[in-house]
Image (spheres, helix red, strand yellow):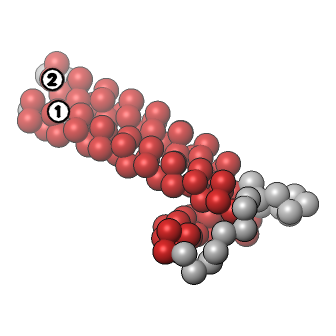
Amino acid sequence: MFIFANLLDASATVVSYLLTLYMWIIIIRALISLVNPDPYSPIVRFLYQVTEPILYPIRRRLPFMGGIDLSPIVVLLAILFLQVFLGRTLNELAVRLRMGGGL
């Protein structure tokens, strides 16, 4: 069972890193949107392609706030929640497996 426990620990770490990377991509996209970027820039297109599938549904459901887009804040809060929830849950499962308690 220690192999599965190590797999859970490694999965928690990888998920945390991926969520942190996506969080930074969201932050960069929000900052770039403040300066009216060139829509034909490969970097800007990449940022929009990666973030728009998550931001658009949230933006559509949020009320209009006078031109302020709150969808990045909602996504960042969701990412922070997932990091804490998934990280702690997977680590706790790994500890229980190591202790012999099972799932």
Q: Residue furthest bottom?
A: 40
Q: Is residue 9 left or right of residue 88?
A: left
Q: Are marks 2 and 1 in contact (CB under 8 Å)?
A: yes
| Whole-percent x, y for residue 21 in the image | 43, 49
* Marking on residue 98: 2
Q: Is residue 53 visible?
A: no
How many C-alpha atoms fall within 10 Å of the one at disc 2: few (<14), some, or many (≥20)? some
Is 15 positioned to the left or the right of 64 in the image? Answer: left
- The relative height of residue 63 versus residue 101 in the rendered view (above or below) is below
Which image quarter holds the C terminus? top left
Q: Secondary structure at mark 2?
A: helix
In the rendered image, the vertical position of residue 86 relative to residue 74, given as above or below: above
First-in-chain label (2 vs 1): 1
Which residue is at a point 53% across and 39% down the rendered structure image?
A: 80
Mark 1 Cα-neighbour bin, 10 Å: few <14, some 14–19, many ≥20: many
Task: Determine whether 1 is above or below 44 in the image.
Answer: above
The residue at 23%/23% (across/down) is 95
The image shows residue 40, relative to residue 94, as above or below, that is below
Label 1: which residue?
A: 5
- Residue 63 location, x and y as percent? 83, 61
What residue is rendered at 16% in x and 19% in y?
99
- At x 51%, y 55%, the residue is 25
Where residue 60 sits, quadrant-wise, is bottom right
Side of 5 where 53 appears, left or right: right
Q: Amino acid at mark 1?
A: Ala
User: What is the CA distance from the residue labelled 2 to the residue labelled 1?
Assistant: 6 Å
Q: Amino acid at mark 2?
A: Arg
Numbered disc 1: secondary structure: helix
The quarter of the picture where residue 61 lies is bottom right
Quadrant in which the N terminus appears: top left
